[in-house]
Image (tube, helix red, strand yellow):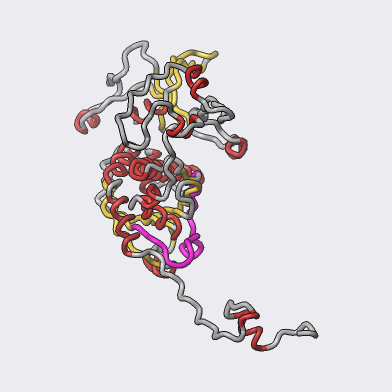
Amino acid sequence: MSDGALSQDEIDALLAGVDSQALGSPVPAPAAAAPGGSEDERKAVQGFLAGTVDAQSSNLSMMTGRDVSFRGPNVVPMGRDDLLQQLPDMVTAVKVDFNSGFPGEHSFLFPEDTAKAIAALMNKEENIELDEMAMSVLGEVVSQMVGSQITALTDKTGNKSIAAIAPEAANVPKAVVALPGGVFICATYQLTLGDGKTHQLWEVFGPPVSADIAQALAGKSAASMPQQPAFAGMGMGMEAMPGMNMGGMGPMPAMPVMGGMQNMAGMMPAGGASVQSVQFPNLMPQASVQEQGNIGLIMDVYMEMTVELGRTRKLIKEILGMGEGTIIELDKLAGEPVDILVNHKLIAKGEVVVIDENFGVRVTEIVSPMERMVES
């Protein structure tokens, strides 16, 4: 190689992934890639998801006001081409990757008509279009579904660091849907929304995510974690405890109760680690700078605001019998606050006022998110 050129043998060795210094030894055949989605992995993921179906049905029923039912899932390993054959031409893809705990690709896929049906129920509208508002609603639905899964995973595995990104929803042709490479795990659900139809949706897990979840459910991740010795956080080992017989030759005397940190100072060995107070993170959610910036993008979007004086229910024969002068009694008492709705969702209550010659409403109460769910 004095002229800097590679011989054909050296080129073949490099292509085979072998160091050029080992040209004298036989070139081993390249190892076959391990297939993704083993049977144990598939069974573990299917068992876990099947255990969350009831919670998913309950959550979506509460959000839509309908009797929603999940069935399944049917979990199988498949590749991109296999899944594309099952999808309709247009799908609503909601990407919601895990970013900690079991990091990797994760998404939900809805047929276009299913996405419209869910958004219509959430917004209390008919003939809805899959615009930005509908995509936001579907993102919220998926966020609730993933939240239930994270809660169940945390309970089963003890991993408290599991988290996912904010859902990103888009209605696109199936050919441009972002899917994991190679063989991945796909769960297929049957969904009923109280409309007499059976809808289908798919949940996709990237190979690292499904593998990590399967290992955690099997207890492998917990078994591999190093065990902390007793009192390790106090800077002392068991051998430092005076009067304790560690050889098992005699009874161990009862340890006195330590009432405060000043007692701990006397038990510390010379040169031991200092004791510091534990700092816990703030549990109150705070919007990041990026989230605040994203909200600013929709500040000039118009939304329909209505004020509802009251409601009532009538039989068809009573409605047909109405005429001029008919008095309709509402479910509101005189002087009771009226409801203020945005896109048919209750957000506040207020009292009617007169401004010049026009009616107005003075806001007297902002309805909490929990009350909104109950009212809807």
Residue 226 falls inside the magenta stretch: no
- Residue depicted at x 48% and y 76%: 31
Q: Quadrant of residue 72?
A: bottom left
The answer to whether residue 125 is seen in the rendering is no
The answer to whether residue 105 is seen in the rendering is yes
Residue 118 pos. (x, y %): 37, 46
Residue 24 pos. (x, y %): 60, 86
Q: Start and end of the magenta stretch?
A: 166-187
Q: Find the residue positioned furthest to the bottom.
A: 8
Left or right, 236 with respect to 250, comes to right
- Residue depicted at x 79% and y 85%: 2
Residue 365 pos. (x, y %): 44, 17
Q: Nearer the viewer, residue 7 or 196?
A: 7
- Residue depicted at x 32% and y 17%: 332
Q: Nearer the viewer, residue 79 or 198?
A: 79
Residue 173 falls inside the magenta stretch: yes
Q: Is residue 315 above or below residue 144?
A: above
- Residue depicted at x 64% and y 87%: 9
Q: Quadrant of the C terminus?
A: top left
Q: Find the residue positioned furthest to the front.
A: 249
Q: Find the residue positioned furthest to the top.
A: 335
Q: Quadrant of residue 320?
A: top left
Q: Nearer the viewer, residue 161 or 266?
A: 266
Q: How many marks?
A: 0
Q: Is residue 350 above or below residue 298?
A: above
Q: Is residue 158 above or below residue 268?
A: below
Q: Quadrant of the N terminus?
A: bottom right
Q: Nearer the viewer, residue 102 or 95?
A: 102
Residue 149 pos. (x, y %): 37, 45
